[in-house]
Amino acid sequence: MSKSSQDPPKWMNRILEFYCKPHLLEDLQGDLHEYYAQNLSKGRFKANLIFLLDVMKFFRPYTVKQPKIFVRMTFFNLFGTYFKTSLRNLKRHKLFSTINVVSLAISMSVGILMITYLSGLLGYDHFHDKKDRIYRILTHYQSVTSDSPTDLASTSVYIGQKLQEEYQGIEELVILRRGLDEDLTIGDKTISAYGFYASESFFEIFSFRLKDGASATALENPYSLVLTENTAEKLFQDKNPVGEILVLDDKNYTVTGVMENIPEASHMQFEFLASFSTAVQEERAKESTYFFEWNNVWMNHVYVLLPEGQSSDALQNQLDRIAATENAGRERYTITMELENILAINPGRDLSNQISSVVSWDVIYQLLALTIIVLLSACFNYTNLSIARSLRRSKEVGVRKVVGASRNQVFLQFIFEAVIIALIALFVAFGLFLIIKPEFINLIMEGPSTLMQFQWLHLIYFLAFAIFIGVIAGFLPSLFLSKLKAISIFKDASQVKFLKGMSLRRALIIFQFSLSMAFIMGATIAYRQFNYALNFDLGFTTENILNVDLKGNDSELLINELRKIPEVTKISRSALIPSAGSVYSEEVKYKDPLDSAVVYINHVDSAYLGVHNFKLLAGTTFPYDLKKDEDTKFVIIDERLRERFAFESPQSAIGESLRINRRSGDFKVEIVGVIDSYQYTTIQSIPEPTLLFQGKQKSTYYLNLAIRTENIGELMDKLEAAWSKVDPIHPFEATFFDESIASAYGEYKVMFRIFTFLAFLAVSIASMGLLGMAVFTTETRMKEISVRKVMGASESNLVYLLSRSFMFMLLTAALIAVPATYALFEQVILDDYVNRISIGFLEIVPGTLGIILLGLLTISWQTRKAARTNPAEMLRND
Amino acid sequence: MKGSHLGEFEEIVLLTIASLMDEAYSVNIVEEIGQSTGRQTKLGVVHAVLNRLEDKGMINSELGEPTKERGGRRKRFFHISHAGKVALLQSKEQRDSLWKAIPDVVFEGLK
């Protein structure tokens, strides 16, 4: 054997040292060295190689030491004991645990609702493959007459065409035009559908896929249509529609493609597309060129696809340059443009003329703020109760510290406990979430939605959320407990300042109750405003009037059919339903050609006044109804319009002429009647003068049926039968006047429901927190109470003694909540409304009083129990 | 544990340890097996078997004095334990009884 002192390379040794179990290492390493020394005779390189191979070969299950994490098992073992003590604690203090779990669960259910909602919303438009490069052009329209610009999601056809023709820095560009709300007809089959005009590159930019047809050419030629799968199925069932001819607005269109249905997570929703060249061709045939002009920014949407790796700055500069040239020389308005990435659309900014409805960030922030308030409120509860109870846990902390627990470990233990409670709460919260989800969908979205369907990914979010909440809720108590010094705990427990946080805890409870009171007042105010709006005197009758949507049918035919039904007493026709939210206005002049008034318009027939019981001050209703192509001759004005044009009396206005300001020139009408002013708009807005036009067949869209019946269902069947004789295609649609009004004030209802829900959450969380505090206080003062009782204190004395500080807190909460809520509603929320309730006794007192009573009840449950205990039982053991 | 059953190679290693008396450490064992049975074994194989035998309680081990050729590292010496001896004897008895049961005719001509 050569006694060479040469050793194998160190790094090879290190590999062995890295993995090998310590008790095997020395011997094994020695063996290998021995072999190495033998092998050196075969040459150093070969010896090294063999050594390395051996080192590798000994990497076996029995030689490999456990990874570091397992070495740190003590840490996990501790978690085991934390888990055990946490569970024991939960079990021992059932009431506190229940309070904590339930209040956390209630608020967390709202939290996970928001998580689901947001994760649905934030996933919008992510299915577009080129999403990072797709931008749309927004428009800011600043008119000289207004202070701030109107921000639009739409833009002009002009800019789209200009960029397409002159600008090289974009890959693709598509122009869309909204507002194709049309009937599609094939043979005897008609459906109504909503669609857009879209130019050729639509399918190049967006990842909507064509199932049939060529995507490059489908939208090229005028009068081409692309249907979504659903629309195609409605019209053609299983037949392949490509190449078929459809009739739309009396013109023939060829179906050139069928596309997959629009995903719900798309910010644009439509049922079919027509080629944009159709709109271009039709507009070219007209005399007006307004369609192609710079300032026609209302109905069109331009989306561009930027080349890969290019920022939007160059295009933005180009847009600014174009805007600068175009705006020069225009005095009445300035138009500027901005680029917005497709992912920023929904949820997005608050813009007018969205292509389809979009949730704005403002709404999300409001919802988030409310959620966070509710969540914090529940976390406060936990913090409050845990700190209050820390007296009981201090001995445990002391023992742990004596045995050697570090401050970090104690801190971790209590955080861990909070997280466990939060996880249990998550379980309960998920159940609650399933209950409130449908309510929420009803409230926020139109129609059923798949966006909020549960996904497994959500589970991860929920767990992370629960852990987060646990950490937040457990932070303060853990900090407090971990700071305790073992020596001071055992030496004299009374020296530890457990009550240090008392004022903080009082403040938290006061905050919770202020919040509850504010929400209850909010709910009351919203509810009373809603009722006020419904019962507002409109100046005409709405009771027992059924409005039937004509859907383009011949009103004469329908009236003839409906007359046959005895329950229908009177029938009239109108263009719109007043007081229910829709408005239409025109400019009207009397003698002075420079003095024009903006007047709200409705087109009605001669029976209209009678059906609705309008109060006629002078003159008559229209002498006759118009035949099909006659022009309107007469109008009926209301008191406000009479005052506006300063007719001396209603009588003096009869027979006078008014001129209606139209694009095609002034249009003369004669006043035949004057009615008392009535509520044309919803009650929030300032009343303006109104005018009733003698309605034409083409200008009336509703039938107003005055009905008298005991059995609505039966009448509806009869009406439907009559309807289908005239129009077998469209479904019969009728709404009671009162219902239309109620839905116009739907916002109050939504407000009421949101406030009620929040109030419920806040109240339950706050009263549970209060209950916990009351239990704690009475428990810690049991000895004092017993002694007092022995000394002769009466039960009511004791109840008063114990409840005094809580009553003080409740009253403080009321003192904060009432003025704050009053100011909020008076100055901010209801301030814009013209007709509104004034906030008074009835809106403020019942809710506040209710909360105070509830609080007192909660406290007295505990205090009475304490006051009734037999003092002997308490004192005997001391 | 599989109990007292010995695998074929385990038995050889155990016998080698027994025969080497106080000189039984891994490198020696490998060499001894090579010389007495003519089988070229690898350290890795023997090492694993030693480890297994120790787990089974058939052998004990102790660390000796450091030597220079091992880079100053100590050798691990193995001794056969009582259980090991019992297992070897059992194994031998089994074989012997089997041998006895074989009539001489079977090996006629080979002996």
Image: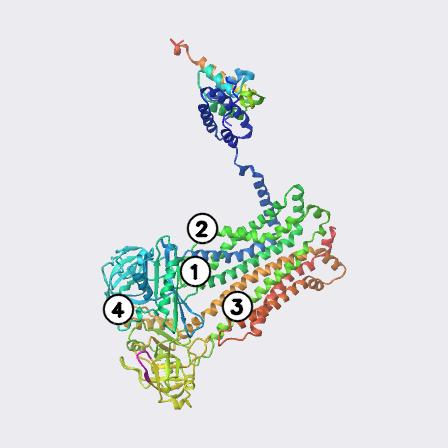
Q: Amino acid at mark 2?
A: Leu
Q: Main secondary structure of the magenta part?
A: loop
User: Does A391 appear above or below A683?
Assistant: above
Nearer to the camera, A791 or A70: A70
Give the SS element for disc 4: helix
- In the rendered structure, which segment of residues is drawn in magenta? A662-668
Q: CA distance from mark 2 to mark 1?
A: 20 Å
Coloration of the structure image: rainbow
Q: Which mark is residue A523?
A: 3
Mark 2 closeness class: few <14, some 14–19, many ≥20 residues within 10 Å = few
Left or right position of A55 against A813: left
Mark 4 closeness class: few <14, some 14–19, many ≥20 residues within 10 Å = few
User: Does A705 appear above or below A11?
Assistant: below
Mark 1 closeness class: few <14, some 14–19, many ≥20 residues within 10 Å = many
Q: Position of residue B82 (x, y in %)?
A: 56, 20
Label 2 belongs to which residue? A457
Q: Residue at x 50, y 63 (%)?
A: A366
User: Does A792 appear above or below A686?
Assistant: above
Left or right position of B10 against A154: right
Left or right position of B93 against A636: right
Q: Position of residue A673 (x, y in %)?
A: 37, 86
Q: Residue at x 66, y 44 (%)?
A: A401
Q: Quadrant of residue A741?
A: bottom left
Q: Quadrant of residue A143?
A: bottom left
Q: Which mark is residue A347?
A: 1
Q: Position of residue A246 (x, y in %)?
A: 24, 64
Label 4 belongs to which residue? A282
Decide which of tag 2 and tag 3 comes sooner along the chain.
Answer: 2
Q: Which subunit holds the residue at mark 4? A: A
Whether discs 3 and 4 lie on one chain: the answer is yes
Give the SS element for disc 2: helix
Mark 3 closeness class: few <14, some 14–19, many ≥20 residues within 10 Å = many
